């Protein structure tokens, strides 16, 4: 079917036929998982719209921005300080990597035992399916896990890649390294964007980044009401969309959605009956359209009220200190904020264990489901310690390892249901 | 037995067979089983048509199929994990650890003192280490499945087969055969491989005695012997190890009736 965007996609060198297939699958998947929900907030219509236009209107906006001389910077990890991108008047898009569609192409150049997320972004590029990647003037990688680190070397042959070095520990010398990396990144962004990052601009960008984090924090606060006023799937979607939507518009829209949510909470309305067991997810990021596990959990009679993940609280928990005025003070503030990220790539990573336990306690969840992508060593190995920390706190945990394919859905359902029978 | 106390059915729809247990006043009054075939729903219907159950509880991988397709006013579903826990405690009240090896999956379940599930493990999507593996290997060695355990017990030495993947294990077995290893020794090696994999799963939930071994593979005397050897203690095997899930489902149904 022709669409108003065909010309644009063609210019971006997408494989049009395969791309149409992707959009159809995505649309069907979204319909089944999202549009079948009852009692959704009116405010979710915005998200439905954004998602339906994810490769359309949003890409058009990016092309328009590019026509005005603004640059588009793609990122894969919440470690990349977005504030610097925004301060250079560039557009920052978090590249998702949650679909299985390019897997075959990816496996031609990557070992089969590579995590699904890495296969996905490489596969998207090789199969020419992602208009975001194709719009990027720079793709920022990072030295987090070995899989990504080595995959960027290959990706570099297909896209303009820049890699930030992320330390593996959090000692004083690591902070020094990280600070040097933040500076180096600032310079590179200025060069690509052709604009100087001034203190005044950076200050604005820091405030904007924080505003978006605050609105998501507000959402996370409101969702804890009993009865649960919004599904975990919907909150996950909002978090996912935060990575590629325009930050100012997104913050305003989610603010409105929160107002609506607040009314609902006051009226004591919920999307599930009040006795529904409440769970928390923890682990690897779930990128669009990886809604598999939340869907299984929520169609098994539970509801998710927290995501300890990069597409979740890890991305919004900590704000950047806004008090600095000089460039130096602000860079310091960025360095501190980003080093607080408790990704499993760090060693040791006690903060994450503490954060998970205190989050589970605050939310008073019945249990935690730990999610690791197959072949993701950092998270899969850390799952053991997470389980022990939660056990010591008297909170049951179910550890799941899976990927984007649908073949294990029945087995996962059994495990999730058995877990629910156990914690109820 | 009063004429009007209701019949409660538990039905366990597994990948190989479907079992039915009927309870009345807490006693098993009837049981039956059929192979799953390609028409599990039809098989369930023929099992259920023979009885008049006031309430049905389904378990096993086909539980949803029945729940969604059987037109019965009182039907519910529980997972195999819970069904096995309930069934096992009924047969052996003190049991703390359950191992179930079925046609396509293996489960290890830890129970608290009062019989609730405290931890469980299941194999992932691969059938390695399940009944399917034994079935496949029995065919490869041309031994009837029911005799496979006894056959392996005739081994005169223990060889190691390292591959748990059905395809690789078969080629490993073939090359052993080519080197003149006796079929019984190879069969033993295959049984040992399953047991070592199962033990790893059991240890992840923790092995607190008494241990109950259920599921179709519990019929196999070689697996039983090897498990006891490695655990260093005796394990309980119910008289009809395939019925534990269906029994548990029926017991759950009875609880539902009692709560009404
Ligand atoms: S999980 Fe780690 S590597 Fe992945 S996005 Fe988060 S911080 Fe980056
Ligand atoms: S999920 Fe794990 S293996 Fe995959 S990119 Fe993230 S950290 Fe690396």
Image (tube, coloured by chain):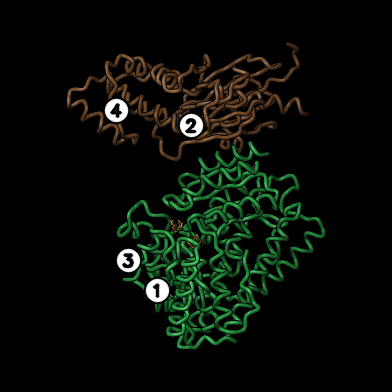
Chain colours: A green, B brown
Mark 2 surroundings: few (<14), some (14-19) or many (≥20) residues within 10 A: few
Residue position for label 4 = B160
Of tags 3 and 4, the one toward the viewer is: 4
- In the picture, residue A255 is in which quadrant? bottom right
Q: Is residue B87 left or right of residue A20?
A: right
Residue at mark 3: chain = A
Residue position for label 3 = A154
Q: Is residue B46 something one can see in this rendering?
A: no
Q: How many marks?
A: 4
Residue position for label 2 = B203
Q: Is residue A27 left or right of residue A159?
A: right
Q: Earlier in the sequence, mark 3 or mark 1?
A: 3
Secondary structure beneath label 1:
strand
Mark 1 surroundings: few (<14), some (14-19) or many (≥20) residues within 10 A: some
Of tags 3 and 1, the one toward the viewer is: 1
Instruction: Examine the rendered structure and indicate whether residue A258 appears above or below residue A110.
Output: below
In the image, B20 versus B135, the foreground residue is B135
| Residue A185 percent across, percent down from the top left | 45, 77
Q: Residue furthest left?
A: B179
Secondary structure beneath label 3:
helix
CA–CA distance in space, label 2 to label 1: 45 Å
Mark 3 surroundings: few (<14), some (14-19) or many (≥20) residues within 10 A: some
């Amino acid at each position: 079917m022709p669409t108003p965007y065909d010309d644009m996609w063609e210019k971006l060198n997408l494989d049009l036929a395969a791309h149409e297939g992707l959009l159809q699958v995505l649309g069907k998947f979204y319909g089944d998982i999202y549009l079948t929900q009852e009692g959704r907030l009116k405010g979710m219509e915005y998200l439905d719209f954004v998602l339906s236009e994810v490769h359309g209107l949003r890409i058009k906006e990016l092309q328009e921005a590019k026509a005005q001389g603004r640059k588009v910077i793609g990122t894969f990890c919440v470690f990349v300080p977005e504030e610097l991108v925004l301060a250079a008047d560039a557009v920052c898009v978090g590249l998702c990597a949650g679909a299985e569609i390019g897997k075959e192409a990816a496996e031609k150049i990557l070992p089969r035992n590579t995590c699904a997320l890495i296969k996905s972004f490489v596969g998207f590029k090789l199969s020419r399916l992602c208009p975001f990647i194709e719009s990027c003037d720079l793709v920022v990688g990072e030295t987090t896990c070995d899989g990504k680190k080595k995959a960027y070397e290959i990706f570099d042959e297909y896209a303009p890649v820049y890699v930030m070095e992320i330390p593996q520990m959090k000692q004083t010398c690591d902070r020094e390294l990280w600070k040097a990396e933040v500076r180096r990144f600032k310079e590179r962004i200025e060069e690509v964007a052709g604009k100087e990052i001034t203190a005044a601009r950076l200050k604005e960008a820091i405030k904007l980044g924080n505003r978006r984090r605050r609105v998501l924090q507000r959402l996370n606060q409101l969702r804890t009401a009993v009865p649960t006023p919004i599904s975990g799937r919907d909150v996950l979607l909002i978090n996912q969309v935060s990575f590629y939507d325009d930050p100012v518009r997104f913050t305003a829209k989610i603010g409105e959605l929160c107002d609506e949510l607040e009314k609902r909470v006051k009226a004591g309305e919920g999307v599930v009956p009040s006795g529904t067991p409440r769970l928390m997810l923890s682990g690897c990021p779930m990128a669009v359209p990886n809604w598999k596990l939340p869907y299984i959990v929520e169609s098994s009679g539970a509801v998710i009220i927290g995501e300890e993940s990069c597409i979740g609280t890890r991305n919004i928990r900590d704000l950047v200190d806004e008090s600095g005025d000089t460039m130096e003070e602000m860079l310091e503030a960025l360095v501190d904020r980003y080093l607080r990220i408790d990704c499993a790539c760090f060693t040791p990573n006690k903060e994450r264990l503490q954060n998970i336990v205190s989050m589970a306690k605050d939310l008073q969840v019945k249990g935690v489901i730990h999610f690791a992508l197959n072949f993701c060593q950092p998270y899969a190995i850390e799952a053991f310690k997470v389980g022990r920390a939660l056990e010591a706190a008297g909170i049951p945990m179910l550890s799941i390892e899976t990927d984007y394919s649908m073949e294990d859905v029945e087995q996962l359902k059994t495990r999730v249901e058995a877990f629910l029978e156990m914690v109820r | 037995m009063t004429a009007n106390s209701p019949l409660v059915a538990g039905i366990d729809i597994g990948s190989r067979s479907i079992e039915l247990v009927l309870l009345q006043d807490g006693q098993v009054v009837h049981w039956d089983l059929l192979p799953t075939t390609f028409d599990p729903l039809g098989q369930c219907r023929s099992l259920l048509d023979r009885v008049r159950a006031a309430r049905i509880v389904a378990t096993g991988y086909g539980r949803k199929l029945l729940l969604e397709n059987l037109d019965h006013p009182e039907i519910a579903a529980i997972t195999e994990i819970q069904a096995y826990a309930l069934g096992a405690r009924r047969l052996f009240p003190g049991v703390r650890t359950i191992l179930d090896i079925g046609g396509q999956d293996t489960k290890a379940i830890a129970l608290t003192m009062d019989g609730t599930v405290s931890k469980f493990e299941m194999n992932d999507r691969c059938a390695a280490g399940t009944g399917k593996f034994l079935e496949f290997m029995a065919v490869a060695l041309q031994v009837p499945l029911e005799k496979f355990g006894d056959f392996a017990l005739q081994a005169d030495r223990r060889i190691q087969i390292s591959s748990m993947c059905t395809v690789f294990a078969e080629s490993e077995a073939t090359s052993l055969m080519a080197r003149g290893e006796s079929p019984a020794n190879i069969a033993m090696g295959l049984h040992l491989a399953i047991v070592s994999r199962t033990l790893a799963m059991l240890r992840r939930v923790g092995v607190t005695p008494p241990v109950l071994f259920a599921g179709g593979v519990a019929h196999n005397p070689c697996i039983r012997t090897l498990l006891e050897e490695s655990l260093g203690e005796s394990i309980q095997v119910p008289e009809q190890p395939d019925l534990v899930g269906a029994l548990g489902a029926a017991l759950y149904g009875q609880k539902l009736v009692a709560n009404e």
